[in-house]
Amino acid sequence: MTLLSVQDLHVTFGTADGAVRAVQGVSFDVAAGETVAIVGESGSGKSVTANSLLRLNFGADVRIDGRILLDGRDVLAMSEDEVRSVRGRDVAMIFQDPLTALNPFYTVGYQIAEAFAIHHPGTSKKELREIALDSLQKVGIPEPTKRIDQYPHEFSGGMRQRIVIAIALVNSPKLLIADEPTTALDVTVQAQILELIAQMQAEHGSAVILITHDLGVVAEITERVMVMYAGRVVESASVADAFSTPTHPYTRGLLKSVKSLDTERHERLESIPGIPPSLINLPSGCPFHPRCGFAETLAGRCEREVPELRLVGASRSACHLPEDRLLGLLGGLS
């Protein structure tokens, strides 16, 4: 069953230098209980897309077009009160930096309890404290009866991230958005956080959208991946298909730039030439063509036309190369 349906989403920010077209025509569905990753370089539109699902981008200088259907209801058409009732209850978010996501003036127990009380106003103080204690215990905070009354600065980075996860899950949301939840953590703590998210998802039955640039994380816990570049989805596939037979030059470049178990110690990793484009002055045609080694083989078509997502093998890819060349040239990563 489809829980979330994003249809032709466009997000544009007005700035003194011009319009920043952060998201352009993004469409995707997320089923109940499914785990979907959105990957890409910084500035590709991942976090803007995620923030739009909770209408966190709204403002005088922001234009959002399209539809975001949550259980059939359009989030973009909701009143402010309706959106507030959805945030935290139906859709919750794990923000990238737990230190700034938590309020330094309140104890962690108060912040967990507050997240629950907003949607359950008749809950007593005693019940709220029990709920906060239970949440801390579930996410693996040691000595919860002692630490419930401590402040965010008294916890390590990994512990703060666990507290942010506890706040996000206290209302058993239908959809959990995790925006770079392991960026500032060491490898050991990162593995613990990923295991915790998977465990909590299994317990609550939540769907998960994971925003990340770490392909190792994608391979570990997600089922499907969307690759974004310059505000557009350039490839959408199952994780198995995207990693074994990528059908877009950008996806292939990302995978070839990551060390794998098959990489020889003396072998140099490939890099994607050039730099990401300005979202104010995007190149004509395919936004990836200035960095693509295959663009010059198509007699200028890449410079003239924006490619649409189309079925290529088992994936959907936005590239002008013929299907046989996409599968033949890009599919082999060995």
Image: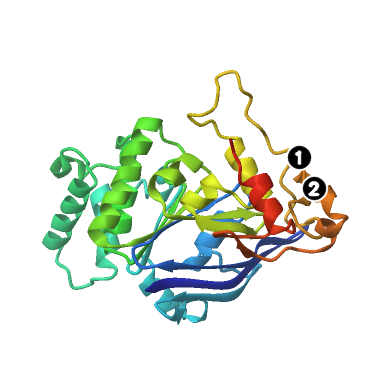
Where is residue 157 shown, x and y percent of the image?
Answer: 37, 36
Residue occupying the far right of the picture: 299
Whether the residues at callouts 1 and 2 have beta carbons within 8 Å, the answer is yes
Please state if 8 lies on the left or on the right of 73 as rendered.
Answer: right
Farthest top residue in view:
266
Q: Residue 71's quadrant in the figure?
A: bottom left
Query: Element under label 2?
Result: helix
Residue occupying image coordinates x 23% and y 51%: 109
Q: Quadrant of the C terminus?
A: top right
Residue pictured at 43% horizontal, 81% vertical? 72
Residue sitting at 65 percent across and 41 percent down? 253
Mark 2: which amino acid? Pro
Identify the amino acid type marked 1.
Gly
The residue that disc 2 covers is 290
Question: Residue 322 appears at what percent x and percent y?
Answer: 73, 58
Q: Quadrant of residue 226?
A: bottom right
Q: CA distance from mark 1 to mark 2?
A: 8 Å
- Residue 147's mark? none
| Residue 274: numbered disc | 1
